[in-house]
Amino acid sequence: MLNKFKNKRKDSDYDLLSDYEEVNVYGTDPHNPDTDGDGVPDGVEVRLGRNPKGPGLLTDLFIPHECNDFKPKALHPHRLTFHALSAVVIKIVMVVFLLSFPAGAWLTPDVLYEQSNQVVELTNNIRTNLNKGTLSINTTLQQAAIDKAEDMIINQYFAHISPDGIGLRNFLLNNNLGYKVAGENLALGYSSAEEVVDAWTKSPTHYANLIDNDYTEIGVGMLSGNYKGYDTTIVAQFFRQPPAPIIPPVEEVVEIPIEEPVVIVEEPVIPEVPAEVLAEKEEPPIEEEILVEEELIEELAIPTLISPNNNSFIKDNIINFIISAPQAVEVNILNNNKVIKTLPVVDNQASSNISLVEGEYNLQIQAVRDQESILSSQYTITVDNTIPIIDHEQTFISVTEPVNETGVVIQAIAYLSEDSSQAEVYLAGRTIQLFKEDNQRWRGSLILSNDDYNEFLSPMVLASILVVDRAGNRVVQDIDFGSIKAVETSAIEQYGFIKDNASENIKPIFDFTNIYFQVIIALAILALLFSIVIHWRKQHIQTIASASAFIALLIILTIF
């Protein structure tokens, strides 16, 4: 019995397989350690799950045949599952790694430069669609914009004027940039160049800069940094038209006139007719009796100012006056009892365009006929062509969280000149109507959910305020944020930005994972095809559906 057991364990060729196993189980040569001659001992191949009599590694891994039971090792479901899970783990680790750092860590100079060029391109696309001239990039102007963005990060403000009173003019002059006209757009916390330009187009003042015909040059500065506790990005867009070149004066050429000869023409002498002869030719006038019919003269009526209306405010200096004056020959327009204009009356009406300087007028109309005159009642007219005044130090947007509630309250407070009659704030494509609280203070608010707020102010641009006075004068200007609830870029947006704008340092990571997923997808497709072809009669709908779903999952992960 012992001898029989020893014979079963005997390994004549020392290939880690007993002679009994080689003869009765695997069919290999017990006296040849490498039956198939592939350089791998028979026992090692068995432990690796390979056929010791197989045609070789590649065939065994990828080609279905009898020796591998028509199931290539590389395409075996459990191996594919392992690789897929490995790929998913790698993807998760990579995402967590990328998001563990602030976005600014990946915003290398090359990425920011590319984003700046995209902003310029998108701006020029808007101008081209409106048949306006494209803007050329001025590198010095670009540096001035970078200086502005850097100053906002260093001094922690988001406004056209810094707390120290430094504005656009200073940044231009510091870079030796003169200008005929200049403008500026700002943005905070962007996820892409498209989002920034889209936010500017929704703001009246920013959009006016984008399409202004006076500008010929552009410069965009982008910087990443920490703003009030949040890692974010700041964009400054500068516009300029260079000053006109100085042309030296042209010396005047003095022409010396050429003297022409004087020609004296003698006029013929007309003989005088004696006075006696002229007197003889004069005939005495014939007196005719003229019969005058007696006219009934109506009483002079009180004149009426038809236009403009009483107590009206007018923004134009030239005003069209229309006056009704029955029976009058002319009318006098008086201001504080002084005549400022006299107009003739035709068909009981007088009209004329009269130029008046800015101010309040207390007018009366005097109808005149021969020695008669009559005055109208008093009319008050105010000429106001001065735009409303905005107190920028007290006008701002604030963002607060309501007590015991979710969401945010966006509140606009404005201090305006007393003659203001209408005010509204434009922010990210929405309108906040302001209501007058006293002579100068106006207020309005907007309540948003947190999700709406993040979408609403991503990225953040300065709000615009429109003010209209009683005369119809309008002014649209930017106003600052008094307080900002900074918008945090979502993890998906951050990852998408890093993926779409990968720097040279992290681009190989995305390339490696993409190739890895593509290989797995190819193997999965092959496995599915082999399984269907070889065992098509045995396939069930569930198996095909699960395999197809598996492939779809891999494709989605690859795209992501």
Image (cartoon, grey):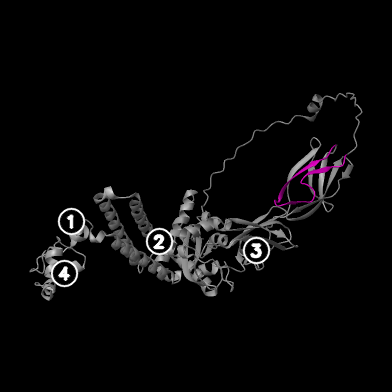
SS at circle 1? helix
Q: CA distance from mark 2 to mark 3?
A: 36 Å
Q: Amino acid at mark 4?
A: Gly
Task: Say if mark 2 contacts mark 4, CB within 8 Å.
Answer: no
Q: Earlier in the sequence, mark 2 or mark 3?
A: 3
Task: Say if mark 2 contacts mark 3, CB within 8 Å.
Answer: no
Q: Earlier in the sequence, mark 3 or mark 1?
A: 1
Q: Mark 4 sits on what residue?
A: 43
> Residue 358 appears at what percent x and percent y?
73, 55
Q: Is residue 518 left or right of residue 167?
A: left
From the viewer's side, name the closer residue of 292 and 191.
Answer: 191
Q: Is residue 84 left or right of residue 3?
A: right
From the viewer's side, name the closer residue of 511 and 340.
Answer: 511
Q: Amino acid at mark 1?
A: Glu
Q: Amino acid at mark 2?
A: Asp
Q: CA distance from mark 3 to mark 1?
A: 77 Å
